[in-house]
Amino acid sequence: MINKKYPKWILAGAVVLTLNACGDGNSGNPQERSERTKMMIANAKLARDPHSYAQPNEVRVKHLNWVASVDFSAKVITATATYDLEHITEKNEVIFDMKGLQIDGVKVDGVPAKFTVGAEKEFIGAPLIVEITPTAKQVSISYRTPQGAEALLWVDGESPFLFTQSQAILGRTWLPCQDSPGLRITYDAQVTVPKNLMALMSAENPIKKNDTGVYSFKMDQPIPSYLMALAVGDVEFRSLGDRTGVYAIPSLIDAAAYEFEDMQKMLVAAEKLYGPYVWGRYDVLVLPPAFPFGGMENPKLTFATPTIIAGDKSLVSLIAHELAHSWSGNLVTNSTWDDFWINEGFTVYFEERIMEEVFGREYSEMLAQLSRQELDATISEISAVNEKDTWLKLSLENRNPDDAMTDIAYNKGYFFLRLCEETIGREKWDIFLKKYFTEHAFQVMDTEKFLAYLKSNLAAEKIEEKVNINEWVYAPGIPANIPKVQSDKMEKIKSVAEEFVSLKIIVGAIKWNDWSYQEKVYFITSIKDVSAAQMKALDRAFNITSTKNNEVLFAWLELAIRKNYSTAYDELESFLVEVGRRKFVAPLYEALVETNQKDLAVKIYTKARPSYHSVTIETIDKMLD
């Protein structure tokens, strides 16, 4: 997931199995290998997850059959979730996570069964406890989602849209489930929607609407609940290669297809680095602008924000990031949310390697320079609140795991892995990572098991003492041996910014139109001491307030707030009302508050809030309360 949430609003065991790249063993036919893999995963002991009531080391689910109907007029999903059970011990109950769901009935092996909904706790929701026998094979739960279910966003309009966002623990708000990243299931589904709309899931998907409004889905590879996803809307499909394609609303499909036409190249580049892509197809669905993140790596179907459609393919590193999750996160998954960097640090590293492979080293180093700049800012902000949250290994018990989703997991994790590469050499590091993904396919990984694996496999390289692992993982801040980014272009931009701020050069000396978006963002974020008059001169020369690149626009709007450049305020309001991506909107509201413009922030938010997803709402509500 691309999030890199600004952190001011935070609250103050892998199982080693040897599998091939598809996670299905090395002998026998594919179906037999798949069944053996599922059995090995089902019997693996899982870590205790403080954010789940489920007890998967006693009784766990292994397959879901989901039959659902989507009602846009009532904004409700009515469904029956039927789970196949795996008995680890002779327990007389199975526990599911849920939050706000209306349970209409429960059956065990087709017979009505007793169930209890426990007391609800903040963030976590309530346990759904179902009485079973030690030989029970299935549990069926009939239920309805509530108004305002946190995972769901119902987008009104002439052409309505629905999408889910399950990470980190919101899956339980639209599906009773054992909602822990360490537990994987396969699933099939049948979803009924209005006939003028198409349904899509994190599974094998249709490529055109049918006449019935009933869509069937299958996901044969086991995935954790946070990767369960559903979207319903008036969308079209466009093929981008033999294994890649894009879905978008009709008015956006041409622009999306152009923007993402290099996806197939990215997929080939990723496979060249770390082994076969095992999920079949890699498609992208462009969601409405209210989507709270840049992207979400739902298997087979990445959800993406339309804010990355710039018209010049300049923001496609987000697609590389979500594609990389097909290995780091989807294939090898963090055991609990304390180990979130296992998902995201690896993915940022892999993203940079894909971008280097497709677009060159200078391009990827410019991205790395922005990551370093973001990391420095995040470390500064978090350290003032809770220094331990700058560790890679987190401690999130009794806290919302959404607190983990800061630049620390992403960028500190990336630089740690980059340091490992630079310490032992890229060739040896790539061999190690390819082996890591292959040997742990479809499994969970925690920090301690990864570090043990790292030290064991690279003992001859003396990786532990050369890298100073503990300082990176279990200590605050940025270690002194952080890798240096080598970007000649960014160094030149830094010099231009310094000269402009100090009035040594005028606007006419700035080659803005020759710069990449990375250079433009780096320039804007490097001129914090600029005057409003200088901003006006820049805007008059380059029309920055009207840019179509949302990364550049966001950086410019934040600077405009802090410098009281009111000319940009109409665009600021439009941006905050139209876009719900938390990475953008939260810092802009924060800037308004910090510059004594809270009344303006509240005025805009009152207008924008109804269209935001709950993930964004929770952050902004806390800020403006």
Image (cartoon, grey):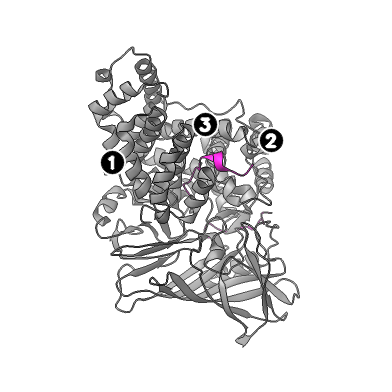
Can the viewer see residue 44?
A: yes
Lower position in the chain sequence, tag 1 or tag 3: 3
Residue, disc 2: 470
For residue 562, side relative to residue 415 (left or right): left
For residue 467, above or below residue 227: above
Q: Foreground: 597 or 289?
A: 597
Q: What's under tag 3, amino acid-wise?
A: Ala
Q: How crowded is the residue under tag 3: few (<14 C-alpha within 10 Å), some, or many (20+)? A: few
At horizontal 68% and vertical 69% (from top left) the residue drawn is 118
**3D distance between C-alphas at marks 1 and 3:** 25 Å
Q: Closer to the camera: disc 3 or disc 2?
A: 3
Q: How crowded is the residue under tag 2: few (<14 C-alpha within 10 Å), some, or many (20+)? A: few
Label 3: element kind: helix
Q: What's under tag 2, amino acid-wise?
A: Asn
Q: Which label is found at residue 377?
A: 3
Q: What's under tag 1, amino acid-wise?
A: Lys
Lower position in the chain sequence, tag 3 or tag 2: 3
Tell me where residue 618 appears, x and y as whole percent. Answer: 52, 51
